[in-house]
Image: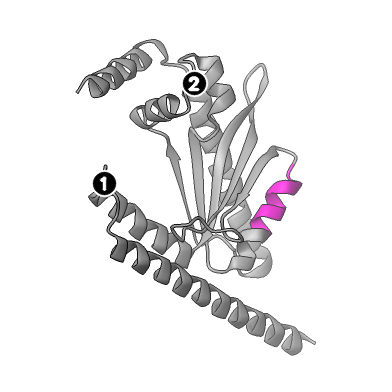
């Protein structure tokens, strides 16, 4: 009870004194969303196809931020949080194919208005739970009226199959919040993760066949 009251006190303090703290992160989300919407339109017009199936942006809630601060034992100062927590702003991009995940990563690496800070590839090295996704910590350029700032954000890129699996796991974690997911359910999650990987591989084969047939017909 004390711990929950303590968290609420911190949340109220942040809400009262840190009104402008989150604005740069909101600006970063606008920039990233605009960037990827332009990529989507450009690739559709040039190639008749975009790797982006759909995209979602989110700001970390204050309660979630406070929990992360406590878990990582970070000082409750704006400067410490800016340095230590890089996923206050987040973008999730869902693709049809695994190849498109890495195509987008390459594009991000080549942009001058985005700096790549860290890569965590949970596709090549999945978590023990079976979770798969490519996580990129970046800094995106935000041009203000009298200065240019670089704001950190996390970009998650995954296939539709990976996204469906992650959504299912999230619902289970929510249901068993504070408790371990039953062992049988954990085994089923891993089996489903393996099945989703097989689906992604078969879809990639189909994609290659389609691309090959297009090349042959154009030749």
Instruction: Work out which residue is located at the far right of the displayed protein and give it.
Output: 219
Marks 1 and 2 in Cβ contact (< 8 Å)? no
Front one among 18 and 82: 82
Using a 10 Å C-alpha cutoff, classify the residue at mark 2 as few (fewer than 14 neighbours), some (14 to 19) or many (20 or more).
Answer: some
What residue sits 67% from the left and 68% below the top? 47
Give the label, 1 or 2, closer to the camera: 1
Counting residues from the start of the chain, the first of labels 1 and 2 encountered is 2
Query: Bounds of the magenta span?
Result: 103-111
Give the image location of residue 7, x and y in percent. 30, 21
What residue sits 33% from the left and 16% below the top? 10
Instruction: Work out which residue is located at the far top of the displayed protein and give it.
Output: 17
Task: State the image quarter where residue 148 is shown.
Answer: top right
What residue sits 29% from the left and 55% below the top? 181
Using a 10 Å C-alpha cutoff, classify the residue at mark 1 as few (fewer than 14 neighbours), some (14 to 19) or many (20 or more).
Answer: few
Q: Is residue 124 left or right of residue 53?
A: right
Residue tagged 1: 179
Residue tagged 2: 74
Give the image location of residue 70, x and y in percent. 41, 24
What residue sits 72% from the left and 47% below the top? 109
Task: State the image quarter where residue 183 is shown.
Answer: bottom left
Image label count: 2
Q: Is residue 155 above or below residue 157?
A: above
Residue 44 in sight here: no
Of helix, strand and loop, which one carries label 1?
Answer: loop
């Amino acid at each position: 009870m004390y711990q929950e009251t303590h968290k609420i006190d911190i949340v109220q303090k942040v809400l009262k004194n840190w009104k402008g703290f989150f604005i740069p992160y909101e600006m970063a989300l606008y920039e990233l969303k605009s960037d990827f919407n332009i990529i989507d339109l450009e690739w559709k017009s040039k190639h008749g196809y975009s790797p982006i199936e759909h995209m979602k942006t989110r700001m970390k809630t204050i309660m979630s931020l406070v929990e992360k601060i406590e878990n990582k034992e970070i000082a409750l100062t704006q400067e410490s949080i800016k340095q230590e927590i890089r996923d206050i702003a987040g973008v999730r991009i869902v693709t049809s194919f695994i190849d498109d995940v890495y195509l987008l990563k390459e594009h991000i690496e080549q942009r001058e208005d985005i700096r790549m800070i860290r890569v965590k590839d949970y596709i090549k090295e999945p978590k023990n739970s079976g979770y798969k996704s490519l996580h990129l910590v970046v800094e995106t350029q935000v041009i203000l009226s009298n200065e240019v700032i670089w704001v950190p954000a996390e970009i998650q890129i995954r296939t539709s199959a990976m996204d469906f699996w992650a959504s299912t796991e999230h619902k289970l974690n929510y249901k068993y919040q504070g408790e371990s997911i039953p062992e049988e359910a954990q085994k089923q999650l891993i089996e489903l993760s393996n099945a989703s990987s097989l689906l992604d591989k078969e879809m990639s084969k189909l994609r290659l066949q389609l691309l090959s047939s297009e090349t042959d017909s154009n030749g």
